[in-house]
Amino acid sequence: MIYIHQIASVSPQRELLVASMDEVNESANNVLKVVEPKYEGIPLSVLRRMGKAVRMGVGGALPLIHHLAFPLNGIVIGTANGGMEDCIKFLNQVIEFEEGTLTPTNFVQSTPNAIASQLSMLSANQGYNITHVNRGLAFENALLDVWMLLKENSNHTYLLGGVEEISSYNYSIDYLADWFKKEETSNKVMYDSQTEGTLSGEGSAMFIVNAIPSNAVAKIDALKLMHTSDAAEIAKQLKYFLKEHLAEGETVDLLLSGENGDIRSRHFFEAAEGLLNNSSVARFKHLTGDFATASALALNLACQLIQTNALPAHMIKIDHMKEVKKILIYNQHKLVQHSFILVSKP
Amino acid sequence: MSRIVVTGIGVITALGDSAAANREALKKGQCGISFLDLFPSRYAETLRFGEVKVSNDQLRQKFNVLDKGVTRTSLLAIHAFEEATKNSGLSNEQLTSYDTALIGATTVGGMCLTDELYHDANNDTQGSEYISSYDIGSVNLYMQQRYGIKGIGNTINTACSSSANAIMYGARLIQHGLAKRAIVGGSDSLAKFTINGFNSLQILSPEICRPFDASRQGLNLGEGAAFLVLEKEEDAIGKKIYAIFSGGCNASDAFHPSSLSDEGNGPYLTMSGAMQVAGVTNDQIDFVNAHGTATVNNDEVESKAMLRVFTKVPAFASTKSNTGHTLGGSGAIEAVYSILSIEHQELYPSLHFETAIESTGLTPLLAYVQQPVQHVMSNSFGFGGNCSSLIFSKA
């Protein structure tokens, strides 16, 4: 059991849980870019050298670490690509200067473990430090790692996070691989789209977690990671998952769906909705865009929905007017990586 | 808690393409570091590397890899995976069951194709066949798809300690009942990205690397892969047990993005932490497979940390003097070497050493010896302060 005590996010919205559609920031050229806050607690000279992913991750997490009520035992981050912009900047130098004399800054910043390691340095944390990078299940593996860590050490506290940046470079790569829409589509109408591809997004979500129930904002009951291209398999696994993790008479109040406007993935979400026909259904990717660790932002939203019990109309797909006490997050990435995260009111 | 045992090993490096071939080369003190024959780089004839002298076409043919977009990092991983799963005797049914996990690690992933990535990322092509293979997760995801692995899949990146963490993660999945067996390891191939990255940090040696020598001038990059099959002891009855994985420790040095603290706090924490987890005292460690990259910083700091941890520093060596530094692959490759030492009750020497570092005075093992080997520690310390130590023991 994981109890979430503090949350923070950097997202394409000024505040991730936007009250009304009018206030939702609109995508431009099929991309939702983050609105970066004024980062506090990072020396300016260090901040200037950070790429966006490192900035979002470190800047998002440091305020949580600095206001911690518990000693921190480690840092566990999920990111598929880390600092992609620095990575390609360095790569461009390699090619354009024909492997000449290069400066190392972009190289050092480009490794995916730069977020977790910068956090360890800026907070002088010598504990467990790891970066999970398994594309669309990078954050879920971070979550699973923390789940095991807290079983091993029930008095420990960890920083858990998911981070991804979109740069023109990885946008190009995923665009060429047909993961983004070819026609201009607004995030405000993305779920109506009948074409292939989604909208690109980015963001970071950070959580302070431990095994202590008191004063927690939410708890994670269960987690499942899957690799399949078969929607029937997802339905089968979901049925089994709910049977295993819901007590007699317990129901899922809300399915927080990772629906992304890509016609190729719709049947996965319909399969999940079909099994949860008494649950309300809400969507979030018009707020975040789609990216490998979008489920981290979904978890942030789930925590807020449980705290506030106010589900904004623009997120609702199916409304059963239920109090939100138990949320199932279902997400999939690139049609083969899937996850269920069961979150509830502590 | 059940003991976690190793029931399969597979490895490919500049020393050879199997555990047996690697062992023979280690026994003879062979060095696989040379100028480049296969990988095209400006430094092909001026710097030395631990290059695997098997071409991508040969690797593809050997394992009948017909899919498009499979990178060298993945091909090397497949080579080690096939050997490890074969000698563990895993059936196809076991491989594809929900309780088999695949935990990989790499630092370059598909970025070994630096030139192709350059063109695809800068949008001046229609997309090459490698368009879905550049990211770090691509290696594991291809293997999951190729072998129909349905259990938990993960890729870990903690720079040069990546595959040491993959081993620990897999063992923990088994301990927590999330997998019955875990295939764990890592792979990295030579890449212009890493060659030029390490060159920009001025830590590539102009000569063949000399771990723990007073006049060492840096590291040689290498390439390779290794995988281990981990199971619970009670699930492996009747199987050959190569060694026990007694435990490991991960900690952060929390000091600098590309060098270790003078006192070696991270290495100190992981070496002492791993012994605590494994339940052994420092006099019980028979051998340390050191990280030993031969950079000025690492070898002195690692020596100081060993002096802090051990009442009497045990025999130690760095196989980076044989293979070069294989980055994300090195933790798993050196785990296999540690296991070979235990399996055959023998220790392999460190190469190219002449004079001890003045401040520490430590001399690595310089000749092949046969002796009782009960516990071996394997160190991996990565950029960003990501330190890990593992302990393997005789069954």
Image (cartoon, coloured by chain):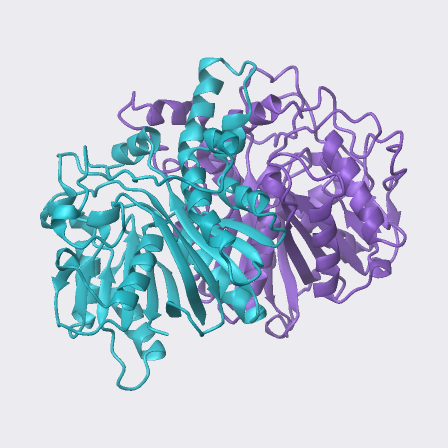
Quarter of image, res B212: top right
- Residue B222 position, x and y percent, is 63, 32
Q: Nearer the viewer, residue A239 or B266?
A: B266
- Residue A62 position, x and y percent, is 48, 48
What residue appears at the point 26 percent right and 85 percent down from the top-left corner? A249
Quarter of image, res B98: bottom left
Q: Nearer the viewer, residue B93 or B253?
A: B253
What residue appears at the point 32 percent right and 53 percent down from the top-left corner? A297
- Residue B174 position, x and y percent, is 55, 67
* Residue B51 falls left or right of residue A302: right
Residue B245 in view, yes or no: yes
Quarter of image, res A325: bottom left
What residue appears at the point 75 percent right and 44 percent down from the top-left corner? B290
- Residue A122 position, x and y percent, is 56, 43
Q: Nearer the viewer, residue A112 or A235?
A: A112
What residue appears at the point 82 percent right and 45 percent down from the top-left corner? B316
Q: Is B364 situated above or below A236? A: above
Q: Quadrant where the N terminus of chain A lies? A: bottom left
Q: How many marks?
A: 0
Q: Quadrant where the C terminus of chain A lies? A: bottom left
Q: Is A46 situated above or below B171? A: above
Residue B148 in view, yes or no: no
Q: Is A335 situated above or below B320? A: below
Q: Nearer the viewer, residue B100 or B258?
A: B258
Chain colored purple: B
The hue used for chain A is cyan
Q: Is A286 situated above or below B262? A: below
* Residue B327 falls left or right of residue A338: right
